[in-house]
Image: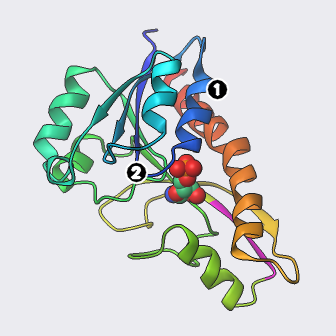
Amino acid sequence: MNKKRLAIFVSGTGSNALNIIDHFKDHLQIEVGFVLSNKKDSPVIEACAARNVSVHVFTNSEVADGSLLLDVCLREKIDYIVLAGYLRLIPLDFIHVYNEKIFNIHPSLLPKFGGHGMYGDRVHQAVLEANEGCSGISIHLVNEHFDEGRILAQFSCLVKDGDTISDLKKRIQKLEHAYFPVVIEKTITLENND
Ligand code: GRF
């Protein structure tokens, strides 16, 4: 079979994007086609260059245009999109074309601590303020509602007494790096190997 091609969208430092790129390097069935960043100074740009992965840098008004995003992804023969810390709204026409083909990762156990405005440190802060005994990650497909698409997998970790946002963030990041690429890989291979 032709390799399935991923585009990874990032807004932040891109540690998940790089981890996914490294996971699929030399993979027989899946490859990363390109990374899209809406931040022109993201460290992910240089790190991708070092790995020979191309990066498209788009402005916020460009990424709001579904037809522009679609053009790039269709031209590059992209089969699946991975949102790895991507903070812009995905246009509806784009979601409809890539229906059930867009993965997202959220740093809490959805439906808890998800929804509009819940991203980054705000999520961890809310978890700590609610005195939760555990938190974790949710890997899900994207639909037209923030953080409400079908959940593919969740992994949990303890919230310990005295945890700071940064302690919890580190524990969550370990889960993200361990499981996000694997869930993407299993989902795509199961979908395409029958
Ligand atoms: C991760 O915590 C992810 O769960 C969230 O955004 C963060 C991205 O981090 N959606 P990085 O840019 O991959 O380091």
Q: Quadrant of ligand 1?
A: bottom right
**Kind of residue sitting beneath label 2:** Ser
Mark 1 and mark 2: Cα distance apart in space: 20 Å
The answer to which of marks 1 and 2 sits earlier in the sequence is 2
In the rendered structure, the answer to whether residue 10 lies left or right of residue 174 reads left
Kindly identify the amino acid type of the residue bearing the numbered disc 1.
His
**Relative to the observer, which residue lies in front, 146 or 34?**
34
Give the number of the disc on residue 11: 2
Region of the chain picked out in magenta, as a range = 133-137
Residue in the image at 34% along x and 48% along y: 39
- The image quarter containing residue 2 is top left
Prevailing secondary structure class for the magenta stretch in the rendered image? strand
Q: Is residue 186 magenta?
A: no
- Residue depicted at 45% across the width and 21% down the height: 49
Query: For this view, does 91 lie left or right of residue 52?
Result: left
Question: Seen in the image, is 163 located left or right of residue 172?
Answer: right
Residue 187 visible (yes or no): yes
Q: Which residue is mark 1?
A: 23
Taking the magenta stretch, the answer to whether it contains residue 136 is yes
Nearest the eye: 106 or 162: 162
